[in-house]
Image (cartoon, rainbow, N blue to C red):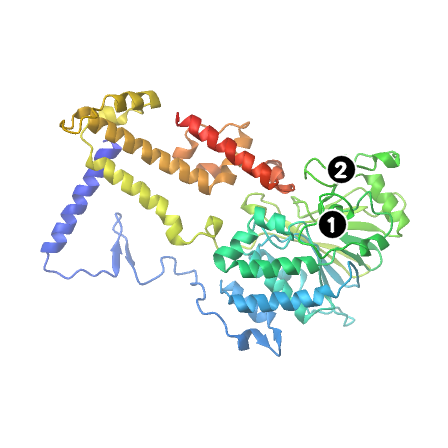
C-alpha cells in the first residue's frame, strides 16, 4: 500500500473515531491515552517516572545570598535538579566575581595543594563529576592547608549549560577569593561566544543584558598562573614574543577580544607543533615557532622552544588546556635534564560536543605527588534540545510534515504506480507546463497531478530544509567523512543517520578541527552566505 493511501486510511479511521465518540453515550476518560499497542498512559503523569521533573520554582534572594555571599552548595544542588536562577541573581553573582578578579594581576601565583582543571565548555553535570573525582572547594589536606583550584579557561560555548557553569564558578570564587583561580581561555571573548553558543544561550534563556555582564567579566580574567613556582599554567601555551614573565604584566587584558597576533593572542591560542614529540636535535631559534594554520591565528611552538623558555625562567613544565585529549590529558616529551614532561595538556570536558567519546582529567599536586584524576561523562546529565529550542519549536517541523501528508492524501486521486514513482525536476516542470492557465476551464487530471507532485516535492523539501537548518554541524561532519559529499538519501532518511559515522575520538577530532580556529570575519561570513544562496537557487533551477 502506498504512503498516500495509508495516510488516507488513517484519516478515514480518525473521522470514524470522531463520529463514534460523538454518538457514544459513554463518558471518555481523557486522562488516559492508549497507544496502538494498547499500552495505557495517564496524561497527568510523567511517561518516565524514574526521572524527576525539573524544579520549576526559582529560589529567593534570601536562599541564594546567605550572609551576603552566594550559597554555591545550594546552587549546585538546585542546578542538579535543573533549576534556574533569576537574571537579577545571575548578574549580581557575575558582577561580584568581576569586582574581585579586576583587582588580580595578569600573572597569578598559586600555592599547593592544588587541583588544575582544563576546559569545561558548558558541560555542567560533568563539572559536578569533576568535583566528585578531585575534591571540593574548601577541602583541606592532612596538614590543614586549603586546597587550591586553578581553572585554565574555556568555561563556556558548545555545551548545554554554559550559564550555570560560569555562574557556579563565579559563586565559588566569591566565597574563596584566595583559593579559586580562574584564567581566561580563547572562548572567553566576544567574537567566540557570538560565533558559537554562549551568546545565543544567554539571549534565548534570559536576555542580552546577561550576556553583556558576562562579557565584562571575561575582560577581568587573569591570563597566566605560576603554580608552586614551578609550573607555567596558561590556557594555550607560550609565544615567540615571550622572553620574560614580566612581559605578561604589561598586557592590557581588559578588552573584549585579544589582538589576532602577538603575546596576548598566543597565550590564548597557540598549540604545540605536530612534530613536538619527534624533535631530537636542538634547532635554531628561527625554527622554534611557525604559523598556526589550524587556528587561523597564533603559532605552533616546538619542543626546543618550550625547553628554552623553561630554562630561561627557571620553570619545570608548561600546563595548558585548549585541545581535546582522548584520555583527558597528554604528557609530552620530557626534558632530558629534569626527566619531567616539558608540556602537559589537560581537558576536563568528557565526551566533548557529545561526539568525541573522550575521557576528562584533572591534575592534583601536593608538592610531592603529581596525580592525574580521570573521569567519564556524567550518566545523569539530562538531554537538551539543540539550539536551546523549546518543545513547541522542536515540534513544528514534525507537525508541518504531517500537515503536508494530510493535504497530499486529500488530493490523492492518482494510481499507486504514479505516486510510487520519484519524479525528477524535469518531470515536474513538464507537468506544470501542461496545466491550463484558463481560469474558466474545468480542472483536469494534469492539474491534479501537478498539485500532488508539488505537495510531494514541498513535503520532501520541507524536511530536507529543516534538517539542513537544525543539523548544519552534523551535516558538515558527515560530508567531511565522505570526502565532501553528502551520501544520497541521508537527509530524507532522518536525523539518526547523521550520528552514525563518528566512531572514535580521532575521527571526531579531525572533523571538528575547523571549528577550533578563529571564527571568520563578518565579510567572510557574508561571502559564504551569498555562495550558499547561489547554490540553492541553482539547485531549484531559479
Instruction: Decide: is 415 above or below 292.
Output: above
Point out residue 207 in the picture as x, y percentages from the top left corner. 51, 59
Q: Is residue 496 visible?
A: no
The residue closer to the viewer here, 423 or 426, is: 426
Q: Distance of mark 1 from mark 2, alpha carbons?
A: 14 Å
Horizontal and vertical percent for residue 224?
Answer: 77, 55
Q: Quadrant of residue 494?
A: top left
Residue 275 appears in the figure: yes
Tag of residue 420: none
Location of residue 136 by image quarter:
bottom right
Q: Is residue 220 left or right of residue 439?
A: right
Say if 156 sits above or below 500 in the image. Answer: below
Around disc 2, counting alpha carbons within 10 Å, would you say few (fewer than 14), some (14 to 19), or many (20 or more)?
some
Q: On screen, 393 above or below 71?
A: above
Can you identify the residue that label 1 sits on? 320
**Residue 492 placed where, x, y %?**
39, 33
Q: Residue at x 45, y 50 (%)?
A: 385
Secondary structure beneath label 1: strand
Out of 510 and 433, give the one closest to the viewer.
433
Residue that carries the numbered disc 2 in the rendered image: 273
Q: Residue at x 65, y 41 (%)?
A: 517
- Quadrant location of the N terminus in the rendered image: top left
Q: Secondary structure at mark 2?
A: loop
Quarter location, residue 441: top left
- Is the C terminus in the top left, top right, bottom left or bottom right quadrant? top left
Image location of residue 445, percent across then percent down: 17, 25
The residue most toward the bottom is 67
Kindly identify the residue that appears in the image at 45 percent across and 36 percent down.
497
Q: Earlier in the sequence, mark 1 or mark 2?
A: 2
The residue depicted at 16 percent of the width and 49 percent of the height is 17
Q: Is residue 439 above or below residue 52?
A: above
Q: Is residue 2 left or right of residue 510?
A: left
Amino acid at each position: 500500500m502506498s504512503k498516500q493511501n495509508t495516510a488516507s486510511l488513517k484519516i478515514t479511521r480518525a473521522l470514524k473515531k470522531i463520529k463514534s465518540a460523538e454518538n457514544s453515550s459513554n463518558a471518555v476518560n481523557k486522562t488516559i491515552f492508549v497507544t496502538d499497542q494498547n499500552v495505557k498512559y495517564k496524561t497527568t503523569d510523567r511517561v518516565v517516572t524514574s526521572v524527576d521533573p525539573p524544579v520549576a520554582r526559582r529560589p529567593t534572594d534570601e536562599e541564594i545570598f546567605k550572609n551576603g555571599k552566594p550559597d554555591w552548595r545550594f546552587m549546585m544542588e538546585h542546578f542538579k535538579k535543573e533549576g534556574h536562577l533569576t537574571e537579577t541573581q545571575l548578574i549580581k553573582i557575575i558582577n561580584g566575581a568581576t569586582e574581585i578578579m579586576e583587582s588580580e594581576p595578569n600573572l597569578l601565583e598559586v600555592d599547593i595543594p592544588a587541583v588544575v582543571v582544563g576546559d569545561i565548555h558548558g558541560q555542567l553535570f560533568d563539572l559536578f563529576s569533576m568535583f566528585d573525582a578531585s575534591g571540593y572547594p574548601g577541602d583541606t589536606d592532612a596538614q590543614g592547608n586549603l586546597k587550591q583550584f586553578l581553572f585554565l579557561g574555556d568555561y563556556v560555548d558548545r555545551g548545554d549549560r554554559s550559564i550555570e557553569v560560569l555562574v557556579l564558578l563565579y559563586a565559588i570564587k566569591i566565597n574563596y577569593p584566595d583559593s579559586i583561580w580562574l584564567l581566561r581561555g580563547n572562548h572567553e571573548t566576544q567574537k567566540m561566544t557570538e560565533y558559537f553558543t554562549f551568546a545565543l544561550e544567554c539571549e534565548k534563556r534570559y536576555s542580552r543584558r546577561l550576556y553583556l555582564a558576562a562579557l565584562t567579566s571575561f575582560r577581568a580574567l587573569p591570563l597566566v598562573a605560576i603554580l608552586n613556582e614551578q609550573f607555567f599554567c596558561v590556557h594555550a601555551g607560550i609565544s615567540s614574543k615571550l622572553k620574560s614573565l614580566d612581559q605578561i604584566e604589561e598586557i592590557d587584558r581588559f578588552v573584549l577580544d585579544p589582538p589576532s597576533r602577538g603575546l596576548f593572542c598566543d597565550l590564548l591560542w597557540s598549540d604545540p607543533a605536530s612534530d613536538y614529540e619527534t624533535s631530537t636535535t636542538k634547532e635554531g631559534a628561527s625554527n622554534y615557532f611557525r604559523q598556526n594554520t589550524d587556528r587561523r591565528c597564533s603559532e605552533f611552538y616546538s619542543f626546543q622552544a618550550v625547553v628554552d623558555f623553561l630554562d630561561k625562567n627557571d620553570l619545570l613544565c608548561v600546563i595548558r588546556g585548549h585541545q581535546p585529549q582522548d584520555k583527558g590529558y597528554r604528557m609530552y616529551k620530557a626534558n632530558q635534564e629534569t626527566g619531567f614532561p616539558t608540556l602537559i595538556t589537560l581537558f576536563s570536558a568528557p565526551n566533548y560536543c557529545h561526539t568525541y567519546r573522550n575521557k576528562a582529567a584533572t591534575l592534583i599536586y601536593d608538592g610531592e605527588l603529581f596525580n592525574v584524576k580521570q573521569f567519564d561523562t556524567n550518566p545523569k546529565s539530562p538531554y537538551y534540545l539543540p539550539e536551546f529550542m523549546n518543545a513547541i519549536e522542536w515540534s513544528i517541523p514534525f507537525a508541518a510534515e504531517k500537515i503536508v501528508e494530510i493535504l497530499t492524501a486529500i488530493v490523492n486521486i492518482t494510481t499507486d504506480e504514479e505516486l510510487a514513482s520519484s519524479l525528477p525536476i524535469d518531470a515536474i516542470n513538464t507537468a506544470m507546463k501542461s496545466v491550463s492557465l484558463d481560469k474558466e476551464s474545468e480542472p483536469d487530471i494534469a492539474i491534479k497531478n501537478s498539485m500532488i507532485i508539488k505537495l510531494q516535492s514541498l513535503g520532501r523539501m520541507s524536511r530536507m530544509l529543516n534538517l539542513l537548518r537544525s543539523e548544519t554541524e552534523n551535516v558538515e561532519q558527515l560530508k567531511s567523512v565522505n570526502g565532501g559529499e553528502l551520501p544520497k538519501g541521508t537527509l530524507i532518511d532522518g536525523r539518526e543517520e547523521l550520528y552514525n559515522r563518528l566512531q572514535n575520538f580521532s575521527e571526531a577530532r579531525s572533523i571538528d578541527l575547523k571549528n577550533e580556529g578563529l571564527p571568520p570575519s563578518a565579510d567572510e561570513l557574508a561571502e559564504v552566505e551569498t555562495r550558499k544562496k547561489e547554490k540553492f537557487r541553482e539547485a531549484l533551477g531559479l
